[in-house]
Amino acid sequence: MSQDKSEALAALAWLIDAGADEALQDDPVDRFTAVAPKAKASPQALRPASEAIRPKTELPKPSPPKSVPPAVDTDPIGRATEIAARCNSLAELKAALEAFEGSALKKLATSTVFADGTPDCHIMFIGEAPGREEDLAGLPFVGRAGKLLDKMLAAIKLDRKKNVYITNVINWRPPENRDPSPEEAATCLPFLRRHIELVEPEIIIVLGAVAARHVMGRTDGIMRLRGKWLEYYANGRMVPVMPTLHPAYLLRRAIDKKLAWRDLQAIDEKIKSLGLLERGVVRG
């Protein structure tokens, strides 16, 4: 072995004995500089190209079908006026009322209460609104108040089957028999006005404060109005109108029946003064 090789081996042995356990690189390494860790490959990068995750394409979601709200009648009074004006007979008017959908009261009522009695008698009684019995029967004044009204009519020889025609301002029962609101009454009034025109009454009797207010447009209490003849314009002439107490009121306050009797006597006198008996309008 050459001397150079022997010296190299001897130097290596000395280094090992001194604790050197790794070889030095050709280029110096700065041990004081932090080395950034290598970034890990993403799972997508490790997948084969054929299995690479593709971004999802979001398809637009179909919009839910829009429900069409029911048509709202924004002018029920105007429509009632148009419909009523086209009616040329009581049968047409009744059919129009039964088909009319502009009143919220109708949705709660059992039936449309149109009228009862003899339309060609020309003596017309107008009440307020149907009650429970009237709503079930579809006829005005058939409950306790109706029975009392029949007795009142009989006292002056009138009878709904012979010579009296009866209707109401309101054609559908208000819940709990409450007074109709001004809007509810206004919706029914075009039909009532046409009703009066078609019947062509010689005399009108309005029963109670509500009927007097809506038929005559008077806000006075019924005690101030009753017993006094008023006038209603229809078909080019003035029709005499007598406001009187409602039979339902008389059931609650029998002491005022004497006032109703005075009104009935005035009605009887008016029938005679107009000569309705002689003309055969009233059949006794």
Image (cartoon, rainbow, N blue to C red):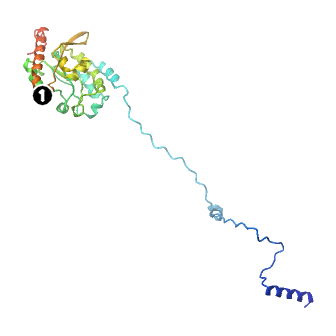
The front one of 231 and 47 is 231
- Residue 181: in sight, yes or no? yes
Q: Please identify the quarter of the rendering in which residue 114 is found.
A: top left
Residue placed under numbered mark 1 in the picture: 251
Q: Which residue is depicted at the point 33% across and 23% down?
A: 77
Q: Nearer the viewer, residue 206 or 167?
A: 206
| Residue 206 visible to the viewer | no
Task: Quarter of the image for the C terminus: give it.
Answer: top left
Mark 1 crowd level (few <14, some 14–19, many ≥20, 10 Å Cα)? some
In the rendered image of this protein, does residue 17 appear above or below residue 81?
below
Residue 105: where, in percent of width, then height? 27, 31
Q: Position of residue 65 (x, y in %)?
A: 45, 42
Residue 274: x %, y % from top left: 14, 8
Percent x, y of residue 189:
27, 21
What amino acid type is highlighted by mark number 1? Leu
Q: Quadrant of the N terminus?
A: bottom right
Element type at marker 1? helix
In this view, the residue in front, 55 or 244, is 244
Extreme residue in the bottom direction: 1
Residue 169 lies in quadrant: top left
Q: Is residue 138 left or right of residue 13?
A: left
Q: Is residue 259 left or right of residue 22?
A: left
- Horizontally, residue 35 falls left or right of residue 255, namely right
Task: Report the residue at 79% width, 70% height from top.
Answer: 30
Q: For this view, does 48 lie left or right of residue 271?
A: right
What's the residue at 7%, 19% (across, down)?
155
Residue 226 image-quadrant placement? top left
Number of numbered discs: 1
